[in-house]
Structure formats: structure tokens, C-alpha cells
Image (cartoon, rainbow, N blue to C red):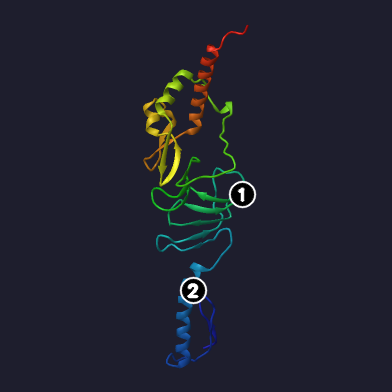
Amino acid sequence: MPDTITLNLEFNLPEVGGSADTWGAKLNANWVKADAEIFSKATKLDPIFAATNSITTLVQPGDVRASAPPAFAGTAGASPGWRFTPFVGSVSYIMGHADGSVMVGPQFRVGFGATPDFAVVPGGDGFFAGDATAVAFFTSSDQALKQDIEEIDGETALTALRAVGAHSYTRNGVPEFGVIAQRLEQAGLDRLVTVGPDTYRRVNYNGLIAELIAALIHIDDRLRALEPPAP
């Protein structure tokens, strides 16, 4: 019989005659088995960078997928250029976008469990288990973004702040200064308090500044009223 090749990887199978009970025939039979075994593994690992193909392992949870650019509905510009999904069937991803950015979604977390060290979740909220430090923090405050604008009553604000008080305390062994969320709720400033996913209360200190300004204006008005009239 003439020389042949294996089905998948085209290994050469030399001519060995018609008998299957020769060393050449047996070697060729082993090559056929090796061809099938290697090809069954190689097709799962071989990098194929065409836009319609992907490298995918889908055997156990925790597999990593490197796929071709998927459609990215609702965005302007090109689709992401690469993607890793850490769990088969999960919507979590890390993508390299055509604009040069790296996208992580639907949320980014550092740490494990219900209270990670750092997390950014859908909607733009961020959570830090430790300190957050920056040169400056800016909060959007444009009038165009606000509705139902009203002045805060200074006397009411002063009464509430007196009930809230100012406190020193330790947190995780570190001395700190601030307010107690429950005291704000008791003083009627519950709009400045929210409960996080870890069930602990959080205080909107930016909103507290507005209450302080209103109280200071009220104090200033009372002091001015006590001043003697100009001669």
C-alpha cells in the first residue's frame, strides 16, 4: 500500500505492505492513535485570532475564556478587543476596549466575601474598607442637576446639630473625630444617613456641611441683631 498521512495532523505513515502484523503497521497504528489524541487537546488550546473564533475551556467552574471581539450593545465606537470571563456562564468580564481602556464589569472588587476591601458597583458607587486619599475631592453640584431647591432653616439646623453633637472615638484602634449616624437619625437628619450592603450606617458629610452653613447663618443673624445700631 502507498504512503499515507494521518487524518488530523498529517503525520506520515510509510508504506508497510498488506499485513497488519508487522512492526511498521503497528507503528503506523500508534501514529493514528497519537494523531487523534493530540488533535483532541490541541483544538482546545490552539490560539486562533480570527474574529469569529475563540480559545475556550468549558470543563469546570473557574475556567478562563479568551474570546474574539463580542458585540457590545449600547456603546459608541468599536467593540472590545479581548475578554476574560472568570466563570463559565457568568456575566463578569475583563475587556480590552478598542479605545485603549480596560473595562471590568459589572462590578470591580478587591478582596472576597460580602465586604471586600474595595468595590465599585453598578451605578458608580464605590466602597472602601480603609482610608481613601486624594489631593482633592469634587462633588457635582451644578444647579442644572437639582430640582425643588429650598433654603435650609437655620434655627432648625442649629437645633438638630446641637442634638447630634461632635464626638471623638476610636475605630479599629485608630483615634478619629466625627458624628454618630444614629444621632443624626434621632435629630431628624435621617436624609443624611444610608445603610450599606454590610448593614452599617453611612453619613453624607457633604450634606452635613449644608446644615452647618445654615446654622452659622442663623447664629450670625442673631449676633447682628444684638449689635448696637450705628450712630
Q: Position of residue 98 (x, y in %)?
A: 62, 52
Q: Name the disc covering residue 39, or none.
A: 2
In this orientation, which residue lies closer to the viewer: 108 or 17?
A: 108
Q: Is residue 74 above or below residue 193?
A: below
Q: Amino acid at mark 2?
A: Phe
Q: Reading the chain from its start, which is encountered first: label 2 or label 1?
A: 2
Res. 68 visible in picture: yes
In this orientation, which residue lies closer to the viewer: 202 or 54?
A: 202
Mark 1 neighbour class, 10 Å CA radius: few under 14, some 14 to 19, many 20 or more? few
Mark 2 neighbour class, 10 Å CA radius: few under 14, some 14 to 19, many 20 or more? some
Q: Name the disc covering residue 133, or none.
A: none
Q: Is residue 203 above or below residue 172?
A: above
Q: Is residue 84 left or right of residue 185?
A: right
Q: Residue at x 43, y 90 (%)?
A: 20
Residue carrying label 1: 78
Q: Looking at the image, which residue sits at the far top? A: 231
Q: Position of residue 61 (x, y in %)?
A: 40, 60
Q: Residue at x 42, y 24 (%)?
A: 160
Q: Position of residue 204 (x, y in %)?
A: 47, 33
